Every structure is written in C-alpha cells, then in structure tokens.
C-alpha cells in the first residue's frame, strides 16, 4: 500500500513509526525528503486539495499542515537521538567519557623574586621613587667606565665579567649600577629612582653564589644630600620589608662610584640573641651604599657643585632568601616546581 492510498491518520502513524526507526542520519534525511520535500507526501496532499469538494478543502488543508508539523518534530527528535547514540558509540569504542569531570586547573603563582620585587616597587613608589629598567647586555662604558671603574682598575677583578663580544665593549651587566648612568642622562635632578633586575657574574656556584642573580639599584639626586638622608631612606625601606623598625649600622666599604662608601648592616629581624641567619652576630650584612662620587655625577651630565646624591645596591636575591628562609640561592632559578609550588 503506497502513502497515497492511506488516510491522513494512517499516514501520520506510518510516518512517525518510520522516523522513530530510522537507523542513521542518511536514512532519516531520505525519509524527510519523501514526506516533506518537493513532490513529497505532504505536497501531494496539498496539491490534491483543489480536486476536493469546496466544503472539504479547509479541513484537508488543516490536516495536511498538522501532519507536516508532527512529522517535522519527529524527524528532529530522531536526529537528536541519533547524534547522542553516535557519541555513546564513540565512547564505547574509545573509552572516552564526555560526562567525566574535567581535571582540575592547576593554579600557578608568582615567583618569590617577582613577589618581593613588586612589593619593593610599591614601597619605593609610595616614597616618590621612579621605577626604572635597563638592558641586561650593557656597554663596558655604562657598566664600568662611567662608574669610575677604568679598564685597569682593580675593582674589575671582583666583577668576574661575561663579555659578549671579542672587543669587550659589550658585557652582561655585573650589577644594576649602570642604570644609574642611564638615569642621570634621562632624569632631571632632583629625582629618586630604583631599578630592579638580573645581573650576571662569571663565578663558580655554591649555596650563596649564582652566576645570575637579582639586585635593586637605588639612586637619589638632590640638593645637599647627606649620609643622614641615606640612613633615613634605608630605615624606611627596612621597616617596609620587615614590618618593624630596624636598627642599622654603617661600616666603611669601597666602591669606586661612591665616596664615602659603606656596607650597611641591619639588626637581625629574626632574633635578639643571635641565630643561624645572622651567624650568631645579631647583624646581617644587607646592602652596599654611599654618596655618589662627583665624577660619576659629572659623567652623567650632572653638576656635582650643584647636586649631590646617594646610591644603594640592594641584593634582591639575598633579601628573598632572608624573607622566605631559603638556604640555597641556586633554588631561585632552578625552575624546580617542587620548590616554586611552595610560594
Ligand atoms: N653595584 C655594587 C655591586 O653590585 C653595589 C653598590 C651599589 C654599591 C650602589 C654602592 C652603591 O657590587
């Protein structure tokens, strides 16, 4: 019996039944064409309407449209069912389970050096300092010459340098002090600036020596700057870092670009009677500093008769180690996740 010989009720029952049992998407598409497509069953019903008695035409039209609606819904439902079956089939075949909970997203964290650098930047910013950046590959001039360290100067011995070219005119900066030179050329006095960054020294590594480490250079230029200003600034800095007032002392220290130069020690923030951090002395050697040497100001285009300043070289890596109780500097750049995950 062809579709044409069935009454509308039977046509509907047959169409729904065939839709529900379509075995795959292409069979379903063929059915859809057969019923709903051009020259299909529904169109046949509609085109037969003009041959009916006028009184029957309205009802026949309605019936054809209802049938069309019911079949469309059935085809769509079967199509969704088939899609689900396909996913399920793939899951069974491959063992993939789309309903399994996703693995948790692992959260990273900031490197301890980044954490402390940002904290210090905020602190210095609040004290009116500009934050500067300088290149890691520097000219010999900025790294040494302009800082009062000429080629034959003995201070170059202590700076075991990585040279970047045969002529020796480019080096991996051995300290952040070359940013002082750059700052003096670009900033108009009076100014205050700090420059955190990586520095490099060609030395054998051990628990307290690494070829690559971090420093934060500080430079303040103004009128009548004295050692008193330097001590005041360092005490504010330490209070910010350790969260309490910390006693400091100065010992003489030699750096060609400062005069006088000092080693600043801080009272051990971790004990009162001596501990392993301060090697039982209650003092921690914290940072070299001093008043900027007049020739350095002059090399930076600043008149030493009119201006003076102080500079300091904060050992960031060392500070991070103190802060988090890290006992080996080599952990810092090891990239070992077991170490990094602790922060
Ligand atoms: N640049 C010096 C160093 O790394 C430290 C320093 C900075 C000393 C500023 C005095 C003033 O050894």
Image (cartoon, rainbow, N blue to C red):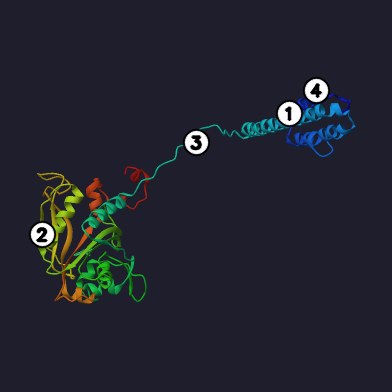
**Mark 1 element type:** helix
Neighbourhood count class around disc 2 (C-alpha, 10 Å): few under 14, some 14–19, many 20 upward: some
Nearer-the-camera pick, 242 or 160: 242
* Image quadrant containing the C terminus: top left
Neighbourhood count class around disc 3 (C-alpha, 10 Å): few under 14, some 14–19, many 20 upward: few
Q: Quadrant of ligand 1?
A: bottom left
x and y percentages locating residue 141 in the rendered image: 28, 74
Q: Which residue is mark 3?
A: 102
x and y percentages locating residue 280 in the rendered image: 12, 47
Label drawn at residue 70? 1
Nearer-the-camera pick, 262 or 50: 50
Real-space CA distance between mark 2 and mark 3, rounded to the nearest whole angstrom: 58 Å
Q: In percent of the image, x 73 and y 27: which residue is there?
A: 20
x and y percentages locating residue 328 in the rendered image: 27, 50
Q: Are marks 2 and 3 in contact (CB under 8 Å)?
A: no
Mark nearer the N terminus (1 vs 2): 1
Mark nearer the N terminus (2 vs 3): 3
**Mark 3 element type:** loop
**Mark 2 element type:** strand
Of labels 1 and 2, the one closer to you: 1
Q: Is ligand 1 closer than 8 angstroms to the Cβ of mark 2?
A: no
Q: Are marks 2 and 4 in contact (CB under 8 Å)?
A: no
Q: Which residue is mark 4?
A: 9
Real-space CA distance between mark 2 and mark 4, rounded to the nearest whole angstrom: 104 Å
Real-space CA distance between mark 4 and mark 3, rounded to the nearest whole angstrom: 49 Å
- Horizontally, residue 306 falls left or right of residue 107, namely left
Real-space CA distance between mark 3 and mark 1, rounded to the nearest whole angstrom: 39 Å
Of labels 2 and 4, the one closer to you: 4
Q: Which residue is mark 2?
A: 250
């Amino acid at each position: 019996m062809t579709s044409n010989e069935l009454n509308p009720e039977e046509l509907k029952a047959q169409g729904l039944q065939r839709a529900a049992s379509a075995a795959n998407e292409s069979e379903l598409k063929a059915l859809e064409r057969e019923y709903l497509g051009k020259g299909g069953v529904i169109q046949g019903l509609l085109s037969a309407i003009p041959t009916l008695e006028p009184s029957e035409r309205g009802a026949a039209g309605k019936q054809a449209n209802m049938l069309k609606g019911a079949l469309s819904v059935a085809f769509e439902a079967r199509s969704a069912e088939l899609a689900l079956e396909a996913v399920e089939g793939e899951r069974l075949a491959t063992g993939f389970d789309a309903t399994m909970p996703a693995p948790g997203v692992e959260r990273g964290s900031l490197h301890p050096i980044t954490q402390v650098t940002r904290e210090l930047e905020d602190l210095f910013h609040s004290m009116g300092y500009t934050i500067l950046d300088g290149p890691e590959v520097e000219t010999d001039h900025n790294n040494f010459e302009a800082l009062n360290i000429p080629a034959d100067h003995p201070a170059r011995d202590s700076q075991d340098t990585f040279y970047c070219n045969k002529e020796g005119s480019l080096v991996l900066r051995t300290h952040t002090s070359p940013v002082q030179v750059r700052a003096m050329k670009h900033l108009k006095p009076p100014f205050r600036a700090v420059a955190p960054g990586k520095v490099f020294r060609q030395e054998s590594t051990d628990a307290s020596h690494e070829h690559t480490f971090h420093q934060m250079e500080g430079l303040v230029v103004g009128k009548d700057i004295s050692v008193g200003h330097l001590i005041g600034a360092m005490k504010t800095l330490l209070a910010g870092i350790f969260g309490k007032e910390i006693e400091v002392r100065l010992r003489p220290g030699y750096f060609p670009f400062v005069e006088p130069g000092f080693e600043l020690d801080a009272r051990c923030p971790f004990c009162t009677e001596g501990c392993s951090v301060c090697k039982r002395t209650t003092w921690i050697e914290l940072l070299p500093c001093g008043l900027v040497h007049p020739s350095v100001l002059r090399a930076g285009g600043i008149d030493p008769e009119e201006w003076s300043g102080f500079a300091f070289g904060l050992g960031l890596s060392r500070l991070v180690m103190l802060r988090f109780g890290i006992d080996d500097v080599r952990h810092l750049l090891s990239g070992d996740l077991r170490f990094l995950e602790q922060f």
